[in-house]
Image (cartoon, rainbow, N blue to C red):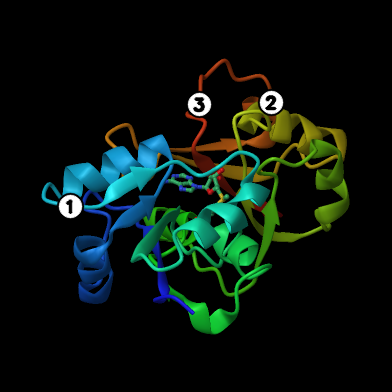
Amino acid sequence: MGPKIDVLGIGCDDAGNFSVAAAKALNEAEIIFASDEQAALIRSYFSQLKAQFESYPRPISKLEKSLADDQHKKIVMLALGDPLFYGIGAILLRFLPAERLRFHPAISSLQAALSRFSVPWNDLSVISLHGRALSSFAGSIGSKGRYGILTDAKNSPQRIAKELVKIGQENALVRVAESLGRKDERLSIYNAMELADCKQHFSPLLVLVVDIV
Ligand SMILES: C[S@@+](CC[C@H](N)C(=O)[O-])C[C@H]1O[C@@H](n2cnc3c(N)ncnc32)[C@H](O)[C@@H]1O
């Protein structure tokens, strides 16, 4: 078995929010797997890294082979927020034993959004629409409650708001947190009815915190 693979979450502040152990893993890494955006962010926080950057393979199922080829090297894998929260962690655990992995989570984007809006999340239900069909959404929403929603460019805030209106929740309070920790971070609050018709262009990187009242 090769060295442990360090899986690092990039946080939602302007320095990535890394622990001492995570920074050490980055400085010692020989290979860093990252998306283009993650690679650019890491290079802006750590200018002296000696590692070679590799993109995540597509489809992601090819990752097992990429890692097997480099199994004796010191590998860091970058993720957003907490890698074990709707992230690369679950994918890695499909083919690697837990002992082979060392996770360094940052707070998740949803946690960061809740903090920005000063909203407690004791009773939060989480829905991920990232890469998923919007048709599953209505069935996941109950009559009352608070929902944290991870989403993508396709399932935009307007499309989600239209679904809320369709199920009679036009008064739902929808908080939108875009590009958390990036230069273009923006926070806004709507009710579902006004958001459904809103012409605003939103960042593709966003989470929603929705209250059904
Ligand atoms: C594959 S999930 C990963 C979630 C991540 N592991 C976490 O803990 O936040 C990707 C989704 O997370 C959300 N996300 C991640 N980083 C974000 C950020 N900086 N600002 C807003 N949303 C973010 C978006 O909804 C994005 O589509």
Say which of 96 and 192 sits in front: 96
Disc 1 residue type (three-letter)? Leu
- Of mark 3 and mark 1, the one earlier in the sequence is 1
Residue 47 visible (yes or no): yes
Left-right relation of 122 to 105:
right
| Residue 71, placed above or below residue 139 | below
- Residue at 33% in and 66% down: 74
Label 1 – label 2 distance at C-alpha: 45 Å
Q: Quadrant of residue 197?
A: top right
Disc 3 residue type (three-letter)? Phe
Give the percent coordinates (x, y) of residue 23. Answer: 22, 66
Say which of 97 and 103 sits in front: 97
Callout 3: SS: loop
Q: Which residue is mark 3?
A: 202
- Residue at 50% in and 26% down: 202
Q: Which residue is mark 2?
A: 196
